[in-house]
Amino acid sequence: MTDAVEVRPITAAELADWHRALNTGFLQQPSLTDDQIEARRRQFVPGRLLGAFDGSRCVATFRSFDQELTTVGGTAVPADAISNVTVSPTHRRRGLLTRMMSQDLAAAKERGDVVATLIAAEYRIYGRYGFGPATTLTEWTVEVGRTGLDPRWSAPEDGGRIDLIDAEDVRKYGPELHERVRRGTPGAVSRHELWWQLRTGAVRFESDWTEPFHAAYRSPDGEVQGMVAYTADGTWHGKQPEETATVKWLLGATPAAERALWHYLCSIDWVTRVKSGWRSPDDLLPHYLPDPRAARITTQADWLWVRILDVVRALEARTYDAEGALVLEVTDPQGLAGGRFRLDAAGGRASCTPTTDAPELIIGIAELATVWLGDQSVTRLHTLGRVRETRVGAAQEADALLRTSGRPWCPDLF
Ligand SMILES: CC(=O)SCCNC(=O)CCNC(=O)[C@H](O)C(C)(C)COP(=O)(O)OP(=O)(O)OC[C@H]1O[C@@H](n2cnc3c(N)ncnc32)[C@H](O)[C@@H]1OP(=O)(O)O
């Protein structure tokens, strides 16, 4: 039956049908208005939106787009970002995702992308295609009354200032600020202009968009070094305001900017609770508060998943704090990127060359993605039986090479 279903890039004329299938797969209202279709047309890139068609009806969707992913040390690699993956419930478990994924990954490899990336709706979907979780996401809830912050706080202590700004200034200053932050953040990805338009209401995909508050931190010399978007939930108990402020996104190019923005959020009258939104597990938020226990972790989960398409370029793009050499056998059931490689790290960089030397460590392509940005330990994977040593001690040596002083972070959902 699957064979009767055709998987192919869609045309611009098929967007409405494609979006109906997409919304159906994500259990959202299936029909979109003409205005919504028009707005979403901005994401149409010929060849990068796949659909599966049973007769004339679209029953599966898949979209990919160009992205850059920052690696350890700050070099960005070209990535094939994957999103909008759905198969209608009438056609599930017949191999349609596998067909769309195979087409897309082969095309990405052909284009020369170093990795593919995605945010997985469910943990068990993408490992089979060679993706591994490569960054972790943490969310905190801050009980403002317990922070120990001075309740009279009114401005940053460092001579900088916080200004409320409108959407136009977010679009003016935000992209440059984000570029600075993401280039210094392993795991962070590039943003298209549309990201800013959607977050500020200039382009609306949904009919129920609501405008958040925006504030910027300016350093004492006037430079915009941080920005936050947040909403409040309107909760009162009797005559007592008990509002929760929820951070939609917060960018700080410096610790001073982050500190000032968190203190600002925790000082807004009526706000008794601040939800941090998606942060790095290494985020300093709790430690910007006199009492770090006021910040309670409410979510910790895998976030960005990575599929390495080119082992040599992936391993040579990042930096290394230690020196050493290791022969890795990288297994890849899809046959896209496996092989045997000698990794030779010295002076902060590494060369990675195909070799016929005996392997010291046997690692799957998904596991390599999981340790590539330094978020996971090879030793732990070895303990779990997911990495195999052919020389005792090789896993620990791999950790000495690959582990990093900070954990990677991807602030974006895409
Ligand atoms: C990046 C993103 O967009 S994330 C969003 C992903 N989409 C969703 O979660 C929406 C709801 N779910 C769906 O639309 C579909 O179930 C999909 C897209 C996840 C899977 O599509 P399908 O066409 O059913 O997958 P396909 O038939 O190719 O499955 C391939 C294999 O993966 C397995 N698999 C697929 N989905 C899942 C899942 N959610 N959990 C566990 N296993 C899964 C299948 O059982 C199959 O295994 P097998 O080869 O051992 O038989």
Image (tube, rainbow, N blue to C red):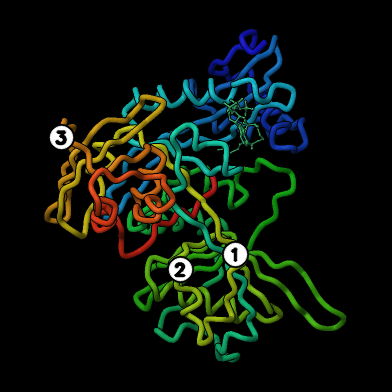
Residue beneath the point at 67% across and 81% down: 269
* Secondary structure of residue under mark 2: loop
Q: Label 3 to label 1, Cα distance in Å?
A: 51 Å
**Residue 190 percent location from the top left of the image:** 41, 46
| Image quadrant, ligand 1 | top right
**Residue 46 percent location from the top left of the image:** 49, 21
Task: Say which amino acid is labelled 3.
Answer: Asp
> In this view of the protein, which residue sits in the foreground, 377 or 16?
377
Residue 176 seen from this side = no
Residue 362 vertical position relative to residue 12 in the rendered view, above or below: below
Quadrant of the rendered structure where residue 165 is?
Answer: bottom right
Q: Label 3 to label 2, Cα distance in Å?
A: 41 Å
Residue ranking furthest to the left: 347
Residue 65 vertical position relative to residue 228 in the rendered view, above or below: above
Crowding at mark 2 (Cα within 10 Å: few <14, some 14-19, many 20+): some
Residue beneath the point at 65% across and 27% down: 87
Q: Nearer the viewer, mark 1 or mark 2?
A: 2
Residue identified by numbered label 1: 247
Asked whether the beta carbons under mark 3 and mark 2 sit within 8 Å of each other, the answer is no
Residue identified by numbered label 2: 283
Circle nearer the N terminus (3, 1): 1
Q: Label 1 to label 2, Cα distance in Å?
A: 14 Å
Residue identified by numbered label 3: 357
Task: Say which amino acid is labelled 1.
Answer: Val
Look at the image and tell me in which quarter the N terminus lies: top right
